[in-house]
Image (cartoon, rainbow, N blue to C red):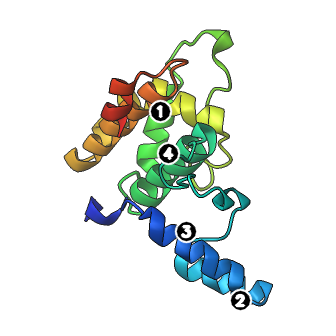
Amino acid sequence: MADMSDWFIMKDSVEHRQKALEWRRCKSNAERERFVKVNGVRWSEILRLSYFDLIQFVVIDLMHCLFLGIAKWITKRIWIDEDILTEKALQLIQKKMSEFKLPSDLGRIPGKIHCGEGFSNFIADQWRNFFLIYATVVLWNHLPNKDRKILTYFVRVCTILVRRIVEINNMKEAH
């Protein structure tokens, strides 16, 4: 987990298209499942459009990618599973969160984070509110410097990407 340099590697469009064609040539569903497990690629009918670059033209679904994907992964896999956020820390974080006074029209407020596995059953809206409202304040004193950096960058990216209008210079910053 310590070396973040290989977390996000840009995929090659030509190679992706070739792998998708290989997937299409698989003879059975079992063979296709094995292929996907190894290569992470499957065929999509949109690839019939020769001008369509599935790597460059993909639309990111913020709810699934950012909040149910990356937010949950950072919190559970890095901070909880690696014992950066202990049960005691989660209880202190919950106590701090309960001191917040928020407007009622904000959407789903995160539930209890110190119960069960920590952050159990959060929905996308709760992850969004947790990171955009609470996280920097309630997590800061419980994270080492490198994890504070992850938190700071992730909150900034979320702040940019959830806007109603995102300008190109903001996209460059988020990237």
Q: Give the Cα distance between marks 4 and 1.
A: 8 Å
Residue type at numbered disc 3: Arg
Label 1 sits on residue: 131
* Depicted 175 relative to depicted 25: above or below: above
Please identify the residue farthest to the right as the structure is shown: 28
| Image side of residue 10 versus residue 94, left or right | left
Q: Give the Cα distance between marks 2 and 4.
A: 32 Å
Where, quadrant-wise, is the N terminus in this rendering? bottom left
Label 3 sits on residue: 17
Disc 2 packing (10 Å; few <14; some 14–19; many ≥20)? few
Nearest-to-viewer mark from 2 and 3: 3
- What percent of the width, then of the height, locates residue 107? 67, 21
4 and 1 marks in contact (CB < 8 Å)? yes
Residue type at numbered disc 1: Phe
Q: Secondary structure at mark 1?
A: helix
2 and 4 marks in contact (CB < 8 Å)? no
- What percent of the width, then of the height, locates residue 26? 71, 87
Q: Secondary structure at mark 4?
A: helix
For marks 2 and 3 on the same chain, the one whose residue lies earlier in the sequence: 3
